Amino acid sequence: MIEIDGLTTETSNEATKNIDQLDSMGIVTLINQEDKKVADAIEKELPQIAKAVDAIAERFRAGGRIIYCGAGTSGRMGVLDAVELTPTYSVPPERVFGLLAGGGQAMYRAVEGAEDSKELAVEDLKRVVLTAQDCVIGIAASGRTPYTLSALEYANQTGALSVSITCNQGSAMASAAQISIAPVVGPEAISGSTRMKAGTAQKMIANMISTGVMVRLGKVYQNYMVHVQPTNEKLVVRSCRMISRITGADGEEARKTLEKAGMCVPEAIVMLQSGCGREKAKEALAQAEGRVREAVRLAEM
């Protein structure tokens, strides 16, 4: 049996003891006051988050994968972060994905008992053929979820990088992980409801890690997500606006160049910035490993 007594995330919050007696404005005000504490807690963990970004970027650049592991809300946070990286940064879905205790169905409905199985985590990681190049990011508010703890332990055995995101200090997961990130967000507004502050902290940290890795890998130019996939009209408009702001081209020229580039935003930017054709832009981007700033310099040579 998992021991949760004494965990910060499981204690009662004295500041919200009377939340059941408040009107709606009072309820949301109290929750907002608690939520403000999340960013401060994360700030204390920035050195560890930066360490994770560096380590993950190095492995990802060498061909490794990012694999989020977790159960319930924590696992869903990992899945959410992973699936966004394909449309936002053109990362193949097989390079970043989430493993959720209980499988895909657990994304929408709780699978009872799945989080308590250490064997299930090993089975899931063996199924995706975990290697020493990969990165396993285990997420659990308590830091003691058997499925997630086991995922980190198996990552260590395999030689993969193990990173834990928890919301309690001194947890089993923190001890198991090579890099531990543990913002202490304090008791929840509703006692034990870790989908609230703990979930918010997990989401913010996952965003920081994945975005930081993408920036380090050159998937961002200035502060634009230039590797976005313009798969619908909204994204096409956003891409054209991005190209215009970066290169100074008007909207019509940006759209025409994007079409000439086969709807590849980085190619369009390099073409406009350097005045080259598509083939040279493609060659420069390949040589620069997708880094637009470097590709522009190469294309201008």
Image: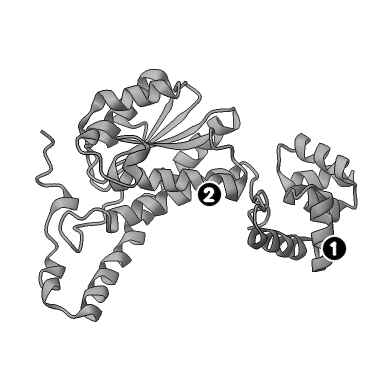
Q: How many marks?
A: 2
Q: Is residue 2 above or below residue 88?
A: above
Helix, strand, or loop for circle 2? Answer: helix
From what the image shows, is residue 9 above or below residue 174?
Answer: below
Q: On the image, numbered disc 2 is attached to which residue?
A: 211
The label shown at residue 213 is none
The quadrant of the image that shows the N terminus is: top left
The colour scheme of the drawn protein is one colour
Residue 281: image x %, image y %?
Answer: 83, 43
In the picture provided, is 261 more to the left or to the right than 74?
right
Q: Which residue is mark 1?
A: 253
Say if mark 2 contacts mark 1, CB within 8 Å. no
Residue in the image at 81% along x and 48% along y? 261
Task: Identify the residue at horizontal 34%, vertical 54% (top origin).
Answer: 201
**Circle nearer the N terminus (2, 1):** 2
What amino acid does circle 2 point to?
Thr
- Image: 22 above or below 72: below
Give the number of the mark in front: 2 or 1: 1
Residue in front for this viewpoint, 143 or 113? 113
Residue 114 at x, y percent in the picture: 24, 34
Comparing 216 with 233, the one in front is 233
Q: Amino acid at mark 1?
A: Glu
Asked whether 201 or 124 is in front, the reply is 124
Q: Residue at x 14, y 72 (%)?
A: 19
Separation (CA) of disc 2 from disc 1 = 30 Å
**What element does badge 1 sit on?**
helix
Graded by Cα atoms within 10 Å as few (under 14), some (14 to 19) or many (20 or more), the crowding at tag 2 reads some
Give the class, few, some or many, for how many residues have Cα within 10 Å of label 1's Cα (few <14, many ≥20). Answer: some
**Residue name at image x 20 percent, y 38 percent:** 112
